[in-house]
Image (cartoon, rainbow, N blue to C red):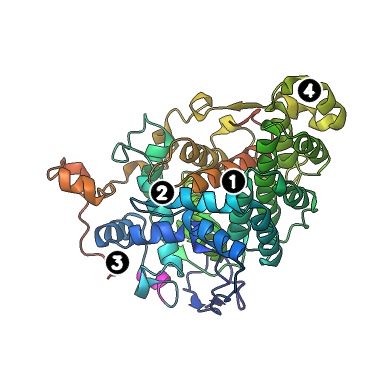
Amino acid sequence: MSEETGPIPGSDTPDSLRPGSGPSKFQFSPAGQVLMNYLAAINAAGDDADERYKIALAAIREKANDVIIEIARQENHCRARDYATRWGLIYAASELVHPAALPFFRSVVLTPIPPEESSEPHSFSTVAEESILRTTAVDGVARLAADGSKEAVDALFDFLHVPSLSVKRAAVQGLMGVRQGESLRGRIEERLCPEDKFLLDIKPIDVRKVTQISDPERDLSDAGRKSNKPITPDLPDRAARTDTRSGDSKTIVQGNDAPKGK
Amino acid sequence: MATCTIPAIPNKDVSGDNLYAPRICNQPFIDWAWSAHGFSKKYWDDGFGYEAVCNNNLPLCRTLSGIWLLNYSADDYWNEQWSNNILHWGRRYVRNQIDDLRAKCGDGSAIATAFSGFLGIGRRVELYLGFFYSSNVPARAETLVHEARHMGGKSHNANFPPGSAYGAGRSGADSSWGYNGAWMYGALYLWWFYADGRRTTAALRQSARQRANFVIDNAFATHPGFTIS
């Protein structure tokens, strides 16, 4: 992390950023290489992105028993604060949809969340990031449970004791999502402490059914309401099709000190 | 002047930076985004990326990636009518509210702060190392939406509830979903991105779902009573 930080927020003085050390070089096992290929493919772009992803997914599933060991090894070696990489590894494990991943998920979820390291959790919370890793793992277990794994159902019950509201909520949702999940309601209720029983009443819904922001323009400040900035430029494919646009949609910006891309 | 060091950079395939960086490296977009959000060279050079705007190891590129996602993730992104959903007009709200966007070191983990013109500090949004290097691209877009809502004059109005991972009893929560505060804006944006985001990937949409559910669970004094299906 930063070495010489800690200015007073709101200071008008510009700051300076220095390069850090380069990325570490790893030697990967065959399973590790397959895993790296998968991580490179999950957010790939281009016309062949879907095909690349399918091939990479098939490859990790083909070696699921070895890949899950590699996932656990790499997750264990990640810096604790490398949340993006750790999340990608847990997501990869969930995409295996393989019972071999269950011990790894258990380990992730049942490892106690370290105490908050941030002095201002509203801005950044290590507990939040750790919780998101765990709910992703819980959802991985829920997929196995939905596929009929009794061991996965047992794990979800165990997660009801984890002292994290989000983990418990995800576990409840996972249990209610299995076939005949409603029949588990009594057992779930028994495991939850009184203040958490409301989790049984939380409904999974579609975003179209949730209360929206009815009049966002009203939520603007006076200055924001008067703002008259040009709208976003069209992407090249649309720009090529629409050579004339209305006056308020001009996007040409001139005379600023914007950096040069190339 | 504070001096800080670029931390170890998370996997850029997983964070989405390798997906979005080539997209921002487009001069018309750079020119527009620079002007529309009030970037200035003074706060974005000296290591923050002004001299290498397409370098996705540096803060400027990583910020523009969040702005790109915010602007082009609706199928019909050119339709930013207020009557549509936040996936469409979120970008409009952000650019209307943010006129001065600055890169700063912060304390090493802090994400961002909105200064809405009180206490003698001019209106602006500051972005810190945590924004550039701890957040993936969808989370950066969510932060811009969250801070823009503060710039719109909406402060948090409650303490975090018992069991909240943000610290039970601490200030910084919104009282309810219906308060229409910064947490609701951010979560709703992520939720729409998960449900209907385009020009992105299933993995980034899933990460948005996890983050939105976390906010729904922990950032409201009264739990909204729903979760993302």
Mark 1–mark 2 Cα distance, whole angstroms, equals: 16 Å
Residue at mark 3: chain? A
Regarding residue A147, the answer to whether it shows in the image is: yes
**Same-subunit check for callouts 4 and 1:** yes
Instruction: Give the residue type at disc 3.
Output: Ala
Q: Secondary structure at mark 3?
A: loop
User: Residue at 36% across / 29% down in the picture?
Assistant: B83
The percent position of residue A211, horizontal first and vertical second, equals: 52, 26
Q: Are marks 3 and 4 on the same chain?
A: yes
Identify residue for label 3.
A258
Gap between marks 4 and 1, in whole Å?
27 Å
Q: Which mark is residue A185?
A: 4
Q: In the image, what residue type sits under mark 2? A: Glu
The label nearer to you, 1 versus 2, is: 2
Circle 4 SS class? helix
> What segment is highlighted magenta in the picture?
B41-45
Of all chains, the one bearing label 2 is A
Q: Is residue A165 magenta?
A: no
Total number of numbered discs in the rendering: 4
| Distance (Cα) linking label 3 and label 1 | 41 Å
Residue labelled with disc 2: A51
Question: Which residue occupies 63% across, 58% down?
Answer: A86
Q: Position of residue B221 (x, y in %)?
A: 69, 36
Q: For the residue marked with disc 4, what is the amino acid?
A: Arg
- Could you tell me if residue B110 is visible in this image? no
Of the two numbered discs 3 and 4 on the same chain, state the one appearing first in sequence: 4
Of marks 4 and 1, the one in the foreground: 1
Of the numbered discs 3 and 1, the one sitting upstream in the chain is 1
